Amino acid sequence: MRASHIINTLGIVTVFIALAMLPSTFVAFLNEEPSKYLWLLTFFILATGGGLLYKFCSVKEEISYREGFAVVTLTWFTVGIWGGIPYLFTGVFDSFIFSFFESASGFTTTGATAIVDIEVLPRSILLWRSLTHWLGGMGVVVLSVCILPLLGVGGTQLFHAEAPGPLKDKLTPRIASTAKILWKIYFFFTLIYIVLIYFCGMNFFDAVCHGFSTLATGGFSTKNASLIAYNSLPIEIITIAFMFLAGISFSLYYRLIRGDFRSFFKNSELIFYCFILIISMALIFLNVYKNVYDSLGEALRFVVFQVISLSTSTGFVTADFNEWPPFSQLILLFLMFMGACAGSTGGGLKVIRVILVLKYALRELRCLLYPGAMFQIKLRKNPVSKNIVQGVLSIFVLSIFLIFIASLFMAFLGLDIVTSVTSVLACFFNIGPGLAKVGAVENYAHIPTLGKLILSVCMIMGRLEIFTVIIFLSPEFWKK
């Protein structure tokens, strides 16, 4: 393990975070906010510090596979720390843990907040919250991959360690080209969404902030009541469409642009995802219509929005689903667990993993019925290797185990069982809102300090899909 390689990359990441603060710094000066000079000072400190780390730990060799895991894990904790500084100097929080929680929630696109009154925040902070979502949406590390080759440092190992999903899907031979393609698609969708909701009546600043949050499937809003504050059906419909688009693998969009329509419309993960969403909407609609909402249109409007919002891990709210019947809440919990497609900005276990787990269970049943037969798991008509299936099962089991352990800790801190479990589930799978005291119209402000630290780690572990962090923390990783 070469410390210089890790420090060099973390220096570059620190410079990126400093540069990311410039828009908020500009907004602070534009609005004559009291913290404007502190924004500027933070930028110079991080930019200078990061630049010095890069300069004095300069390397030319490719980062090794082992170092890639270290860089990815440390990067997400580092951006969480640096990203929390603005919350401290603007007085939003007076606790480092609270600031780290809010920052980690932003960069991991979780959207869980400990801020009670969002609308009193200065605009620089509102923009920063949403921008952390947007940067984390495709991955701070993937963004770094676009720049590292220009600085003489390769990034293949970083992308391999950070890219979501069990099947790494390279679009081009060069990893930097892949990252750039993903970011171009991501930027284009964000721009289109901002323009559309702006022309639907949302002011420009709010449109930008919600654009950053929506395409990142994050959920931070500029309003306490989230999108319901605008009471605009066109805005909700557009948001539904773009949340759904953000929940689809971005590699499919590249193939769609290249004219490969078959790969997009015949994709088994996308088909299964749409099927689950439609079934969930239908079941919840039948459950809440007349029981919660007397109006057919109102029931349909709220059900479709919340199903898409929670399944993509966005977490925007237009209805208090805490008031929905238990049947509907359980379906929403399943959608939180499943999440969106691999290769999207969404969280959750990922649809492709749910498919593989179901296929594995079905194969085991068939093996019991026909002991002498051999059955192979296939995906998109191609055999799935044993290693991939084992990896999926490992993540599935580890996810349940870690959620259980973290929930025990939360219950030990005095939270009720529903709040304990759903707060961990919502943070681990980067959803945001849970049920009970962390439900749709609630927040995480009341969670004890230790609980916030536990949930922050859950966010990062979930964003890096468990193994990256566990490998980094394992004693074997540090052995020569």
Image: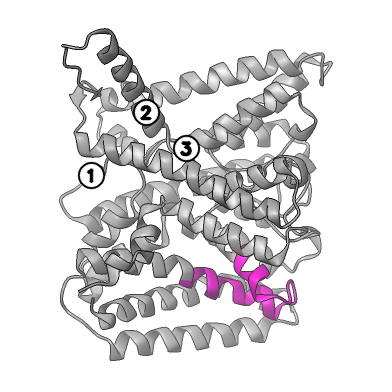
Q: CA distance from mark 1 to mark 3?
A: 18 Å
> How far across and down, in percent of the image, does residue 434 sit?
67, 42
Q: Secondary structure at mark 1?
A: loop
Give the residue drawn at x 68%, y 47%. Answer: 420
Q: Secondary structure at mark 3?
A: loop
Q: How many marks?
A: 3
Instruction: Provide the residue designation for mark 2.
Output: 357
| Callout 1 amino acid | Leu
> How far across and down, in percent of the image, does residue 316 sit?
66, 42
Image quadrant occupied by the N terminus = bottom left
Instruction: Give the foreground label among 2 and 1.
Output: 2
Give the residue drawn at x 31%, y 63%. Answer: 69
Return the disc, 2 or 1, that comes first in the chain's sequence.
1
Do labels 3 and 2 touch, CB within 8 Å?
A: no
Instruction: Provide the residue designation for mark 1.
Output: 171
Q: Which residues are magenta?
A: 78-102
Return the disc, 1 or 3, that comes first in the chain's sequence.
1
Which residue is at the front of the view, 84 or 127?
84
Outermost residue toward the top? Answer: 369
Determine crowd level at label 3: few under 14, some 14-19, many 20+ residues with C-alpha closer than 10 A.
Answer: many
Residue 144, label in figure: none
> How far across and down, in percent of the image, does residue 175 sit?
22, 56
Residue 268 vertical placement versus 177 (above, below): above
Instruction: Provide the residue designation for mark 3.
Output: 247
| 120 left or right of 133 in image | right
The reply to whether the magenta stretch includes residue 31 is no
Determine crowd level at label 1: few under 14, some 14-19, many 20+ residues with C-alpha closer than 10 A.
Answer: some
| Callout 2 amino acid | Val
